[in-house]
Amino acid sequence: EEGEGNLPKLVLTSNGGSRVELYLFGGCITSWKIGNRDLIFVRPDAVFNGQKPISGGIPHCFPQFGPGPMQQHGFARNMTWSVASAGNLEGNPTVTLELKDNFYTHSMWDFGFLATYKVTLDSKSLSTELVIKNTDNKAFFFSTALHTYFHASVTGTSVKGLKGCKTLNKFPDPANPIVGLEEREIVNFPGFVDCIYLDAPNKLLLENGLGDTI
């Protein structure tokens, strides 16, 4: 259906009542509701004009995370993805988007690729899977992330599951992070935090301070 700024978006609804909104521009999920509660955050000043990335939601970082030789976080969040397939399994909708190289991507990153992004919704969970396939005749290096923004009350927010991880604390000097080890069972956020956790486990628990555990 037509989304903000007249940008096309997909709406997935499960039989259990959960709902996801997914913009083709940037392949960006902007809403994930269970009942009336939206677990995803989009900045109030986000622009929906197809010219700059949507600020918030679950944007793509590919083929670069952060700063580097090309634009911040790469080009995938600045491009329009296409629908490759869609289906429904026992009332749980799924859709797969794809993004291919073109003249625009080759101007920054001269490789052939196929990115596929599968989104599956059920009544209590949202699954996202990004797969990058090399369609070129030469190897390439890339970094990627699904850069999720969650609704939260920061003073009540905590993360469990990071104890024992090596940390790179980028505050106060991002260029010279302080190496450490996380010793807390529960990580909270009493002030500004900019910290990388290495070799984090596959499962973490986020208490968003609003009554939700993700």
Image (cartoon, rainbow, N blue to C red):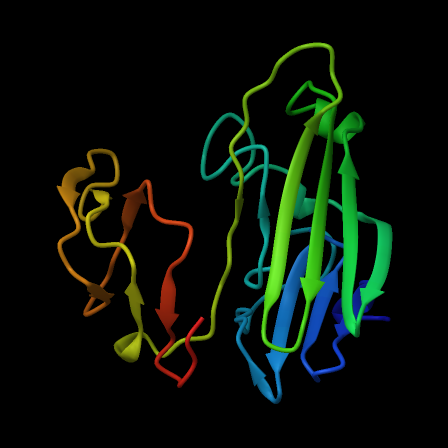
Q: Residue furthest front?
A: 90
Counting from the top left corner in percent of width and height, residue 34 is at 60, 82
In the displayed structure image, the side of residue 43 where residue 82 appears, left or right: right
Query: At 59% across and 76% down in the image, what residue appears?
Result: 124
Q: Nearer the viewer, residue 3 or 117?
A: 117
Query: At 23% across and 67% down in the image, what residue appears?
Result: 189
Q: In the rendered image of this protein, does residue 148 appear above or below residue 113?
A: below
Counting from the top left corner in percent of width and height, residue 45 is at 55, 69
Q: Count all numbered tags in the image, as a single digit.
A: 0
Q: In which image quadrant can residue 198 be found?
A: top left
In the displayed structure image, the side of residue 159 where residue 36 appears, left or right: right
In the displayed structure image, the side of residue 85 where residue 66 appears, left or right: left
Query: At 54% across and 74% down in the image, what residue appears?
Result: 44
Q: Nearer the viewer, residue 22 or 104?
A: 22
Counting from the top left corner in percent of width and height, residue 155 is at 26, 78
Query: At 58% across and 58% down in the image, what residue appears?
Result: 58
Where's the C terminus, which quadrant?
A: bottom left
User: Is any part of residue 169 visible from this angle?
Assistant: no
Q: Nearer the viewer, residue 171 or 144?
A: 144
Q: In the rendered image of this protein, does residue 74 appear above or below residue 206?
A: above
In the displayed structure image, the side of residue 22 where residue 31 appears, left or right: left
Q: Residue furthest bottom?
A: 36
Counting from the top left corner in percent of width and height, residue 127 is at 61, 60
Q: Nearer the viewer, residue 212 or 42?
A: 212
Where's the N terminus, which quadrant?
A: bottom right
User: Is any part of residue 28 visible from this angle?
Assistant: yes
